[in-house]
Amino acid sequence: MKKHILYPLFLVLLLVAACGPAKKTASAPSYRESHIIGFYNLENLFDTYHDEGKNDTEYLPEGANKWTEVKYAKKLSNMARVIAAMKEDNGVWHAVLGVSEIENRHVLEDLVSEPAIAEANYQIVHYDGPDRRGVDVALLYRPEVLKVLATESIPFTFKPSRIDWSQWTEEEMDYFKTRDVLMVRGTIGGEMFAFFVAHLPSRLGGKGADLRPRGAEIIYDRAMELQKEFPGIKIVVMGDMNDNPTDVSMTEFLHGKEFIDGLADEDFFDPFLSMIKAGYASLYYQGGNNIFDIVMVNKALAAAGSGEWQIRPIVKGKFYGRIFNKPFMTNQSGQYKGTPYRTFSNGAFVDGYSDHYPTYILIAR
């Protein structure tokens, strides 16, 4: 039987600066109650068996990656090590952790059973989606914290939209398949929350440029519906957006804003806007520093009333988000020095972690 861990009344965070080597803060905040909410792209967490309808042939023992049970076990252990390291830094497990690039529910069940994190008692929300690569998004949560009331798997559709799709034929639209967006609604400490987990379409080039804005539009429209249906609901949007906080998908279609002051009810506060402008990165794409792994919150959570759950700075007086990048997760030498230490490099299994660093926020009251 898995053990439950009770949250302490006080959570004192002695965290590193938002990115970079260990450095304790001089004055860490203390709250009556607090929780960590984050996102992690697990970089192709596949098991070794073929799933009908999944494009998983390269992740089979006889496939291109020679994906054996030994390699799969190492991958699970490495993912659990990162989650456990975040708990060690924060003093508590993530209350909610969105994940992407997972093949099926089975790999998540194996992950949450890993000895390094089993005591967290993570529960799973997952739907099999239509993505042609065969990867989905999911939500891991601690049932002691989040009481789930409803879940949805929201498909990618081209219409209705304010984007002009005249360059796309109906056949192209019918053929295109990508990850669904996951929505989980529930309560934390009696307050209503909704969590969206996304892995927006990849950077295909050409006609792919409008796909991420459309994905953001789908999330935004559903979020606004929830705000009308449940006045005061606190909304968290997280995921691998395949775009930076400064891109139009995030600033225009998801209404992401850099500052809490002046936030409208129709806006989202994106703490990673300030971080990317300061030079931080959650991954390195085509030689550039990027933050595709974004967690943003609506006004109800960004500018909450007294005594309510509210996003808080993780480093006091500094950033509201953190990119978690311990040395063991980072290449220490060679061509890719300073970048995430991934599972495969130049086609060879190198027993790494992910090509993305996890990101997270702190809420407290």
Image (tube, rainbow, N blue to C red):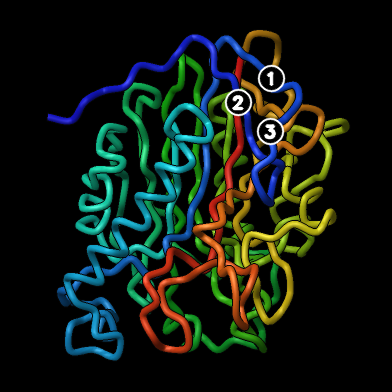
Is residue 51 something one can see in this rendering? no
Q: Is residue 169 left or right of residue 179?
A: right
> Residue placed at 27% from the left, 51% from the top?
111
Q: Is residue 334 left or right of residue 197?
A: right
Quick check: 325 above or below 353? Answer: above
Q: Is disc 2 in contact with disc 1, using a CB cutoff of under 8 Å?
A: yes
Q: Residue furthest right?
A: 262
Q: Please give the label number shown on residue 13.
A: 2
Q: Earlier in the sequence, mark 2 or mark 1?
A: 2
Q: What kind of residue is marked 2?
A: Leu
Q: What kind of residue is marked 3?
A: Lys
Q: Is disc 3 in contact with disc 1, using a CB cutoff of under 8 Å?
A: no
Crowd tier of the residue under label 3, counting other residues whose Cα lies within 10 Å: few below 14, some 14–19, many 20 or above: few
Q: Please give the label number shown on residue 29.
A: 1
> Residue placed at 63% from the left, 60% from the top?
282
Residue on which the image places disc 3: 24
Q: Quadrant of the N terminus?
A: top left
Where residue 110 appears, as percent x and y from the top left, is: 21, 53
Where residue 325 appears, as percent x and y from the top left, is: 58, 53
> Residue placed at 61% from the left, 22% from the top?
232
Q: Earlier in the sequence, mark 3 or mark 1?
A: 3
- Image-quadrant location for residue 15: top right
Q: Distance of mark 3 from mark 1, alpha carbons? A: 12 Å
Crowd tier of the residue under label 1, counting other residues whose Cα lies within 10 Å: few below 14, some 14–19, many 20 or above: some
Q: What kind of residue is marked 1?
A: Pro
